[in-house]
Every structure is written in structure tokens, then in C-alpha cells.
Image: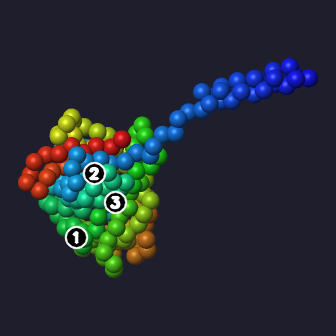
Amino acid sequence: MFPTMKILGLCLLAAGAICAVGAPAASADPIFHSEVEDTILTGSQGTEVPTVLTTDKGELKCEIVKFSGTWSATTNTTLTLKPTWENCKMGGITTFVTTNGCALVFHLGLNTETFESKMDLECPAGKQLVVEPGFCTITIPPQAGLQQVTFTNEGEGTTRALVADLNVGGIDYKEHGAECGSEGEGTTTNGTLTGRITVKGEKAGGQHVGIWVD
């Protein structure tokens, strides 16, 4: 009886060892990093892949698309960028974009290979993003959980930067005015934001610092 129990115990120990070896190690969630605290963030659209906002009225394309933000810590779970659009046209019409303090906020997911992110549009209370092509006003309210954005790392050392590829759909907006693309003033949900943003880090004195995601 006792030899049998001893053999059974050894088998159970062996099975436990196999399970322990076979169990994958838990991976940490991805996170944004900076070499220093109090990092100033600056971003710009890609020359080959410009940032384009599309509604029923057409495609908003601007000669200058800039982004700004800050990180106070060396590790961060979100990236917040305030956009600026200048020298813009939508459907060939000169267009003005008023941001009203709105910002794009990126939240990393659990994918540690492609660093996918969801995007929020956050605005001060009572404010929204306003796009005005001719006799048409497009208002884009705050919204959350838009998909998706993919981050990659670029460069080495203090020149490390983040590249965000935007492929965001399902953006809510309203169009008001005689020259708008859709009829009525109801909410439309087919807005998109596409393009590529390169984000770099700096100290207050202007020296480059490396930023990355892993």
C-alpha cells in the first residue's frame, strides 16, 4: 500500500512540475516611457501620410498639422495631444478649424506586439471641435473609445520618438448649413481620422529626450 502511495505522490509532483514549466509567464501591460520627468511633447503629421479628417462634406487636409502635450512622469499609461490645424481645405474650400481646447487622448491596450490604442476626444465642459468649410459648420463633440491607433518606436537613444498610425472610424459629428454634405442636423457616425503622427520629446531647454513604448 505504502509503495503505491509513494509512486502516486511522485506522479503528482511530476505533473505539477510539467504544468509549472508549461505555464507562460505573465506579460506586463504596455506603457509609454520618457527618459526624464516633465517632458514636453511635440508632434507633426507625416509628409507621405498626412492627417486627414473625413466627413460627408469631404476630406479635411491641412498644410500644417501640429500636436502638443506634456508628461510629468517617466512612465505614463496615456498620451494626450492637443492638435492645431492650419492652412486647411475641405473639398477644395478654405476651411477653418477651432479646437476650443479639445485634445486627443490615447489609451494603450493589452497588445504588446503592435501597441494598439483607443482614442478619446476630450474637450472642456460645453466645448467641441468645430470645422467650418464655407457655409457649413461641422461640430464634433467629445467621445471615447474610438478605434484604432497603432504605435511604433523610431530612432535610438535621445532621438527615440513615437510614431502613431491613425485609422480611426466611427467618429460622431453634426453638420449645419446649406453647403453641408448631409441633409438635416442629426448626428452622423461615419467620420474618420487617418494619417501618421510623429511625436518627439524635449526638455524645457529644448534638448531632445527619448520617448518610447514597450
Tell me, yes or no, if residue 188 can be seen here.
yes
Crowding at dot 1, Cα within 10 Å, few <14 / some 14-19 / many 20+, comes out as some
Q: From the image, tell me which residue sits under label 3.
A: 105
Task: For marks 3 and 2, give the CA distance.
Answer: 18 Å
Q: From the image, tell me which residue sits under label 1.
A: 98
Identify the residue at image location x=76%, y=23%: 11
Comes first in the chain, label 2 or label 1? 2
Q: From the image, tell me which residue sits under label 2.
A: 74
Q: Residue furthest front?
A: 2
Comes first in the chain, label 1 or label 3? 1
Horizontal side, residue 97 vs residue 26: left or right? left
Crowding at dot 2, Cα within 10 Å, few <14 / some 14-19 / many 20+, comes out as some
Horizontal side, residue 206 vs residue 140: left or right? left
Crowding at dot 3, Cα within 10 Å, few <14 / some 14-19 / many 20+, comes out as some
Compared to residue 123, the image places residue 152 above or below, namely above
Task: For marks 1 and 3, give the CA distance.
Answer: 18 Å
Identify the residue at image location x=32%, y=40%: 152
Residue 102 location, x and y as percent? Answer: 28, 68
Compared to residue 11, the image places residue 53 above or below, namely below
Q: Indicate the quadrant containing the C terminus: top left, top right, bottom left or bottom right.
A: top left
